[in-house]
Image (cartoon, rainbow, N blue to C red):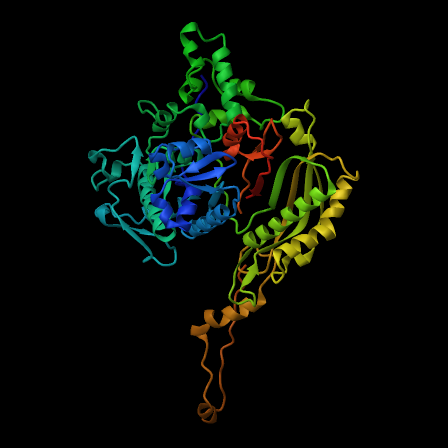
Amino acid sequence: MAAPPPRSDHRIILHFDYDCFYASVLEVEQPVLKSLPLAVQQKQIVVTCNYEARRRGLRKLQLISEAKRICPDVVIVLGEDLTKFRDASKDLYHYLRTFVWGDRVERLGFDELFLDVSDMIEHNVGLLNPNNLQNSFFCLSRQDPAVGFAYDATTFHGHTYPSESETDRLSASSWPDRDQLYVKLLVASHLAGYLRGQLEHDKGYTATVGVSTCKALSKLASSAHKPDDQTALLPPYDWTQGTESNVIKFLDSHEIRKIPGIGSKIARSLKTHLIESPRLGSSDSGLVDDKITVHDVRHFPGMGPGLLEQILARPGSSKEIGVRVWNLIYGVDDSEVLEARDFPTQISIEDSYRQLDTFEAVKRELVSLSTNLIRRVRVDLTEKDEDTDSGIRWLAHPRTFRLSTRPKASPAASAARAHSFNRVSRSAPLPQYVFNLGERVDALGGRLVQDLVLSMFRKLHPERSGWSLSLLNVAVTNMVECAGEQKRSSGRDIKQMFQRQETVLKEWMVPEPTPAELDSRLEVHQGHGVWEESDDDEAIPSVICSRCGASIPHFALVAHEVYHSAGEDEVMRTEQEQINA
């Protein structure tokens, strides 16, 4: 077996996973639903349900008919329109972002966040008094040391892996012998607990949190105790002489597919290799029925980056996939938490169809998609601003409009080929009238289709009919930040600068003299003030359904497969909206 990869555990990462997010959005909107069994429906499938529904025997991926039979009084809400869930996700993202120094907050789908709180923890560890740990104070602001919360730094907040005993409590006597990583994780656990409490108090949502030194480990730790709880992964992380790594112990029992960054294809390839390998004797044949664990992979004869590369390397696979997977099964993940963004890099909406082959149908769908796109652009690229006449200002303007289509693949073509080779696109400058907030969205959508989109479609498909389209996608890209206070602004908001000047320089301004004072003075000295100028979401990863050719988000793929197996005959028409970070 190859040597373990080197570790770098200088960061502290929190992983937030909102509990029953889709059901929680509906419960926050209508609090009475919290005490009722609630299920969210897509097609004829329960895609998620709240804890009250689960208590009564409901579960994800049930047929709606089965859910109603088990729990006749279940409240069923359609979840086809993702708008309210996207808006709630965006709101929670911006809320938690206000607490984090350095702006390292990254969204993963609608219901997960990574927070890099390394700077905050480093600062607050330096504030600890070993002689008075029970009365510690966590400072939340660099500028104001009084902003924060009190906590007991002798013990962790929430769960730990492995579990701590009373004898493990931090004290003045044990302080000199404690690993610095242990202290950092302890302090971070209290920040995680505080943020969870604030999130529930201010927004009405609960979350489960993992605390560790990288994205993969913190995400995995958050799944250890659910819901509304948290887990910190304790050191030692390294496997040294005479010391067993808690990371290895934690990972070994997990099914290989559960490790963040290892997808189903990689897991299947590893399982196939382990089962079919001649290196395994008959005594190991139990692997055929059992799930492959991290321990199974790591201890397979000859396992290492080289063998993993042989097993997993395929045309189009990521570079050095063997090294990456080898790192992950040791809990090594150096990927950065991406810096928070005020808006997405692109916004796109698409619909998939069994067959779309008349001009009237295409035009109708393009108007619907374009209208929804403009509505989404207004939500994602504007913010409230009392200083403007409309009360709203643009954060950014996209410069480019893109239309993509996909003719339906022939039965002989694979799903991968259909997705890769049949999708065609065309781009054009986006008309400026789209940013007119005084115009109705539906009017703008119709005008955009008439002025631009139809001509783009005709250039993609010059035939009069018979296209047999399985997908239409409209998108805006090439974002340019508008003048304002953001640090990446492409210009300066002069009006706001002058408005800020009076407030910023107020204490240095010399008051204007009264007429009486002017009469008694030979001259008036006035201060000459100066001022300083101040400078979405992510795509939901999708896969192509091999049966109907639709682009399906990963989180909905299993439900979509159940939908097919249930024999549904309705026309598949699922709006899918991507948020690219």
- In the picture, measured across the screen, residue 71 lies left or right of residue 400, that is left
Residue nearest the observer in this picture, 535 or 377: 377
Residue 41 visible within the image:
yes
Q: Position of residue 409 (x, y in %)?
A: 69, 29
Q: Quick one: quadrant of the C terminus?
A: top right
Q: Quick one: quadrant of the N terminus?
A: top left
Outermost residue to the top: 282
The residue shown at (53%, 25%) is 565
Which quarter of the picture shows residue 418?
top right
Q: Position of residue 85 (x, y in %)?
A: 48, 46
- In the picture, measured across the screen, residue 492 lies left or right of residue 502, that is right
Q: Where is residue 439 in the image (x, y as percent from the top left)?
A: 63, 61
Which quarter of the picture shows residue 316?
top right
Outermost residue to the right: 463
Q: Position of residue 505 (x, y in %)?
A: 46, 71
Question: Against 359, is 289 above or below?
Answer: above
The residue shown at (26%, 44%) is 153
Residue nearest the observer in this picture, 155 or 8: 155
Give the mark count: 0
The residue shown at (23%, 35%) is 168
Residue 192 visible within the image:
no
Question: Against 12, is 263 above or below?
Answer: above
Residue nearest the observer in this picture, 110 or 496: 110
Residue nearest the observer in this picture, 348 or 314: 348
